[in-house]
Image: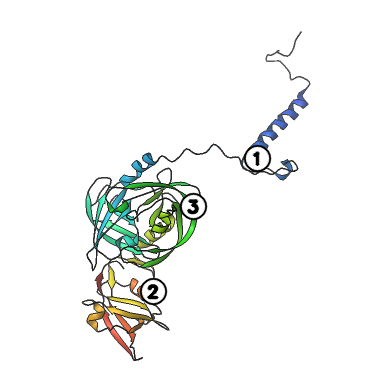
């Protein structure tokens, strides 16, 4: 009689119980070993001599769907057009919608020197006047507010902490200032890059650090636009592109401020508390063009006609060595001292004339374009 298929309520385990338990334990050990090995955490004792533990990877991700991601992100962006002061020339850029009521994230250099700012929302097609809530010129980040905006489509914000070299990305913005968004695909080629960017509007240069570098032909007008991942989440703010020489040699690159750093600036602006780098509200201007003096101070190269310094009697060639008792050692520290001031405030300047004579002067500030 064959007992292998016997069953029933009163059946008993066969005498081979211990071997069965051993087999079960071995099977579970194998399952645990396979799991640990997959995670790259295989214990040293479980790795045969001459072998190493590593991580198994799944199948490669599908290529980024440019059309689908662009269609999802574009309604969450805006086109920015500015008239600059004092030339009155126009400039264009892009922005990212942070708030349904019209809070817009963009690059500082897009609105630098702006007398007026007009914003066109890509989601609803409407146009709004904009004001600058604050900016950090060192980080090249600015925050705008749109007048009369409501129920705008808000961008989905990701994190730049997990960005890796080789990630597929999309840079989206108002390329060439045409008003039509352009989606430029590429890959991340470097993290924490340092560059010197030249502003095409005024030819000024600025050192930018900690940039995400991407192999993508980013162009003028996309500044302030979104660098997004394959899911359409914003991971950076497009701020610069490689020069014409690099582009002609087929090495076009773009650079973006990591979104985590950009949002640090946004949070500081929202507090309403200025810092040496973060300016809040309307810009207070002294009305001078200054350069670094030797051995110290900010040399007044030009006191602009009709602005406070000129009206108060500041002369070209004089050196500003202090503002309200705060030492000024360079043109940059002069800017930092004025950064925390507001229009209509009065500042006291300590000046050194070309012949070495020192004098003090009280100067009322007025509102000016974003520095």
Q: Where residue 189 is drawn, which disc sits there?
A: 3
Compare residues 70 and 155 and report the one nearer the observer.
70
Quick one: which residue is furthest to the right in this view? Answer: 15
Residue under the image location 76 percent in, 24 percent down? 17
Q: Dot 3: what SS?
A: strand
Q: Where residue 332 is drawn, which disc sits there?
A: 2
Mark found first going from the N terminus, 2 or 3:
3
Coloration mode: rainbow
Where, quadrant-wise, is the C terminus in this rendering? Answer: bottom left
Mark toward the viewer: 2 or 1: 2
Confirm whether residue 258 shows in the render: no
Disc 1 crowd rating (10 Å Cα; few below 14, some 14-19, many 20+) is some
Estimate the spatial distance between the alpha carbons at disc 3 and disc 1, rounded to whole Å.
Answer: 30 Å
Estimate the spatial distance between the alpha carbons at disc 2 and disc 1, rounded to whole Å.
Answer: 55 Å
User: In the image, is residue 64 above or below residue 163?
Assistant: above
Image quarter of residue 33: top right
Left or right side of 361 for 54: right
Image quarter of residue 82: bottom left
Quick one: which residue is furthest to the front in this view? Answer: 249
Query: Which residue is under mark 1?
Result: 37
Where, quadrant-wise, is the N terminus in this rendering? Answer: top right
Residue under the image location 37 percent in, 39 percent down? 68
């Amino acid at each position: 009689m064959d007992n292998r298929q016997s069953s029933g309520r009163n059946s008993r385990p066969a005498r081979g119980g211990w071997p069965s338990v051993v087999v079960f334990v071995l099977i579970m050990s194998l399952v645990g070993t396979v799991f640990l090995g997959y995670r790259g955490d295989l214990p040293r004792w479980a790795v045969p001599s001459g072998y190493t533990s590593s991580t198994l990877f799944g199948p490669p991700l599908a290529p980024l769907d440019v059309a689908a991601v662009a269609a999802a992100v574009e309604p969450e962006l805006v086109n920015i057009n500015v008239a600059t002061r004092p030339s009155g020339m126009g400039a264009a850029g892009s922005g990212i919608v942070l708030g349904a009521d019209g809070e817009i994230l963009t690059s500082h250099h897009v609105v630098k020197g702006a007398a007026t700012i007009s914003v066109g929302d890509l989601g609803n097609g409407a146009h709004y006047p904009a004001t600058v809530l604050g900016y950090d010129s060192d980080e090249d980040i600015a925050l705008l507010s749109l007048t009369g905006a409501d129920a705008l489509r808000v961008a989905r914000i990701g994190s730049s902490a997990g960005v890796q070299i080789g990630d597929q990305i999309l840079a989206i913005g108002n390329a060439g200032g045409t008003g039509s968004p352009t989606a430029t695909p590429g890959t991340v080629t470097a993290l924490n890059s340092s560059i010197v960017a030249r502003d095409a509007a005024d030819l000024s240069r600025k050192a930018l650090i900690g940039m995400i570098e991407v192999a993508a032909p980013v162009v003028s007008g996309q500044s302030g636009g979104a660098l997004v991942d394959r899911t359409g989440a914003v991971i950076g703010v497009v701020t610069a592109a490689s020069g014409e020489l690099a582009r002609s040699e087929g090495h076009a690159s773009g650079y973006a401020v990591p979104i985590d750093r950009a949002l640090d600036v946004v949070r500081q602006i929202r507090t309403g508390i200025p810092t040496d780098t973060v300016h809040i509200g309307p810009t207070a201007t002294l009305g001078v063009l200054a350069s670094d003096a030797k051995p110290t101070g900010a040399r007044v190269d030009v006191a602009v006609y009709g602005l406070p310094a000129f009206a108060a009697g500041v002369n070209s060639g004089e050196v500003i060595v202090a503002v309200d008792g705060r030492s000024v050692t360079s043109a940059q520290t002069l800017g930092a001292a004025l950064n925390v001031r507001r229009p209509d405030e009065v500042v006291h300047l300590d000046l050194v004339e070309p012949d070495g004579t020192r004098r003090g002067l009280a100067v009322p500030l007025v509102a000016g374009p974003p520095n």
